[in-house]
Amino acid sequence: MTLVRASTRLAALAFVLLALFAQSVRMRRLVGANQRLRAVELTSLAAARQGQRAEPLLLANLAVLRDAERMDPAEVGLRVARGSVYFLLGRMDQAISGYEAALRLEPRPEIYFNIGRARLAQGDPVAANVALARAVRIDPKLTKELPQ
């Protein structure tokens, strides 16, 4: 009986150690994805200030985001960032696709707001108003941010 208890305890300990190892690997991936997201946000902001010369930097950011999405497929911020990079590139269909991917993970008012902005940029005020209205319905504070 004692041998059975010892082997059960040993098996439980091995299971706990394996779970801790797996969790630490996952945490490293999440931290790595978050660091990449932060870097993309900073460089995209700088690129937005540069205007036309920013395209190579923004395209490089898309590659970084793809890598980060593989590291953390559940991080909604990565999809929002992808949509925003495409928005800065003037590729509204791809921007909307990125934002919609973010919505599938977590519906947030700012995502609907970004879709509305992209729809306006596409020249589709009806679809833009639907998205913007949804954003404001979820977060009324966004009313003061509405495009004129």
Image (cartoon, helix red, strand yellow):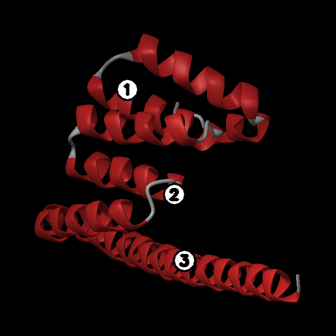
Q: Secondary structure beneath disc 3?
A: helix
Q: Is residue 113 above or below residue 27?
A: above
- Please name whichever residue, 108 or 140, is drawn nearer the observer in this view of the structure: 108
Disc 1 to disc 3: CB gap under 8 Å:
no
Where's the N terminus, which quadrant? bottom right
Quarter of image, res 126: top left
Q: Earlier in the sequence, mark 1 or mark 3?
A: 3
Q: Which mark is residue 75?
A: 2
Q: Which residue bears the numbered disc 1?
A: 119
Q: In the rendering, at what x and y percent does residue 4 appear?
A: 80, 80
**Identity of the residue furthest to the right in this view:** 1
Residue found 43% across the figure and 58% down from its top: 78
Q: Which mark is residue 22?
A: 3
Amino acid marked by disc 3: Ala
Q: In the rendering, at what x and y percent does residue 56 appear?
A: 11, 68
Q: Disc 1 versus disc 3: distance between alpha carbons? A: 42 Å
Q: Earlier in the sequence, mark 3 or mark 2?
A: 3
Q: Nearer the viewer, mark 1 or mark 3?
A: 3
Amino acid marked by disc 1: Arg
Residue found 45% across the figure and 33% down from its top: 115
Q: In the rendering, at what x and y percent does residue 74 appear?
A: 51, 53
Quarter of image, res 145: top right
Q: Secondary structure beneath disc 1?
A: helix
Q: Secondary structure beneath disc 2?
A: loop
Q: In the rendering, at what x and y percent does residue 89 appear?
A: 21, 51
115 left or right, relative to 50:
right
